[in-house]
Image (cartoon, rainbow, N blue to C red):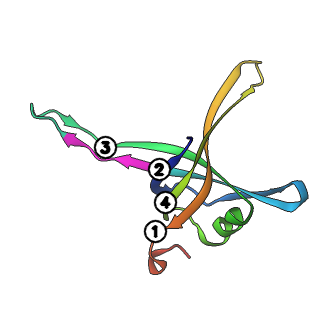
């Protein structure tokens, strides 16, 4: 099973483009943070933020384009997708994305960006 579930904040407004026969594709970045803590010996472990590239297709992409803005809190459910490409120097580059199947907006409407 390939399943990812994330709760985090949107890093920038969605980038939406249209491909094959007008199908919408949206890309967002999502920041998730693990809270810091203190070990028994007193050592402080700081917060750690991870950035995730999220891809949404079709109707979900259109909804994201209309309603999601930088700073909004989202719940994303999807699958991990690995890919690679050759850069200008011919070196293989690898990247990871989450292809979202489901999304819930967690920011209350009155707090959402205008």
Q: What element carries label 4?
A: strand
Pointer 4 residue: 75
Most prominent secondary structure in the magenta stretch?
strand
- Closer to us: mark 4 or mark 2? 4
Instruction: Verify CB contact (< 8 Å) between mark 4 and mark 1.
Output: yes
**Which disc number belongs to residue 106?**
1
Q: In which quarter of the image is the N terminus?
A: top right
Give the distance between the C-alpha atoms of the residues marked 2 and 3, in whole angstroms. 12 Å
Pointer 2 residue: 31
Residue 56 percent location from the top left of the image: 67, 55
Q: Which of marks 4 and 2 is nearer the N terminus?
A: 2
Q: Which of marks 2 and 3 is nearer the N terminus?
A: 2
Q: Does the magenta stretch include residue 19?
A: no
Q: Give the range drawn in magenta.
A: 31-37
Give the distance between the C-alpha atoms of the residues marked 4 and 2, in whole angstroms. 11 Å
Position of 9 compared to 22: left or right?
Answer: left
Residue 40 percent location from the top left of the image: 10, 34
Q: Quadrant of residue 80?
A: top right
Pointer 3 residue: 47
Q: Earlier in the sequence, mark 4 or mark 3?
A: 3
- Residue furthest to the left in view is 41
- Closer to us: mark 1 or mark 3? 1
Q: Nearer the viewer, residue 17 or 3?
A: 3
């Amino acid at each position: 099973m390939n399943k990812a579930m994330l709760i985090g904040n949107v890093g920038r407004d969605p980038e939406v483009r249209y491909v094959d026969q007008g199908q919408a594709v949206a890309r967002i970045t999502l920041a998730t943070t693990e809270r810091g803590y203190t070990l028994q010996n007193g050592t402080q472990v700081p917060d750690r933020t991870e950035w995730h590239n999220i891809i949404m297709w079709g109707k979900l992409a259109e909804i994201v384009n209309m309603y999601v803005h930088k700073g909004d809190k989202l719940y994303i459910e999807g699958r991990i997708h690995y890919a690679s490409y050759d850069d200008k120097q011919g070196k293989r580059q690898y990247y990871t994305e989450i292809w979202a199947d489901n999304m819930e907006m967690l920011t209350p409407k009155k707090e959402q960006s205008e």
